[in-house]
Amino acid sequence: MSEADILSVRNDVTGLVISVVSVSFGMISAYIAGLWLFLREAPLFLRLLAFALLSCGLAFMGAVTAGLNGLLIGTDHAWAKLAARATDIDNFGDVRPPWLYGLSLYEASAGLGALAFGAIYLALAYLTFVYKWPGTTAGPVRVTN
């Protein structure tokens, strides 16, 4: 691969990673809105179903991210094999700065992302199944003939 090919692939994969994160935050935001508007008063089965759908969606996004990580690492290996480069870029995210205590930028960002999404997931589980929401938004249900 040429330098231009590697940079092109790298830019494309980086765009996909940003899209996956964006879609994940969109799913979480939609779930929060649904939780506030509907699910907080929904029966347990409906809350279980909604949380299962959220879980499947986030698991899918995690699997996509894991696959993209392999492509990113592949571009690193291809970049390292280049004999000469027109750009002054020595490497991408495999640098291990001392302030990360031995972690690479990839490892630190993956750990931070996992920590953030794990905390959000646990918070949503708590809000869905444990938290007692104040007040009620639904009026009494009346069925008339």
Image: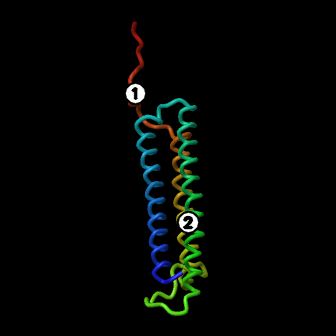
Determine whether 135 is above or below 15 in the image. above
Hey, which residue is sitting farthest front in the picture?
A: 1
- The residue shown at (47%, 36%) is 40
Q: Residue furthest top?
A: 145
Marks 2 and 1, Cα distance to the nearest angstrom? Answer: 44 Å
Residue 75 in the image: state x and y as whole percent. Answer: 55, 77
Say which residue label 1 marks.
Answer: 138
Q: Amino acid at mark 1?
A: Ala
Give residue 45's position: percent from left, percent from top. Answer: 57, 31
Residue name at image x 55 percent, y 72 percent = 72
In the image, taking residue 84 as reference, residue 70 lies left or right, namely: right
* Nearer the observer, 65 or 4: 4
The answer to which of marks 2 and 1 sits earlier in the sequence is 2
- Tag 1, which secondary structure? loop
In the image, farthest residue toward the bottom: 84
Q: Quadrant of residue 61?
A: bottom right
Q: Nearer the viewer, mark 2 or mark 1?
A: 2
Q: Which residue is mark 2?
A: 68
Q: 67 or 144, which is in the foreground?
A: 67
Q: Is residue 73 above or below residue 136?
A: below
Residue closest to the eye, 41 or 34: 34
Return the x and y of residue 48 as percentages of the image width and height: 57, 37
Q: Nearer the viewer, residue 92 or 33?
A: 92
Looking at the image, residue 96 lies above or below residue 142: below
Question: Which element is circle 2 on?
Answer: helix
Q: Which quadrant of the view contains residue 145? A: top left
Residue 82: give x, y in percent of width and height: 55, 88
Q: Which mark is residue 48?
A: none
Task: Identify the residue at image location x=54%, y=33%.
Answer: 46
Q: Are marks 2 and 1 in contact (CB under 8 Å)?
A: no
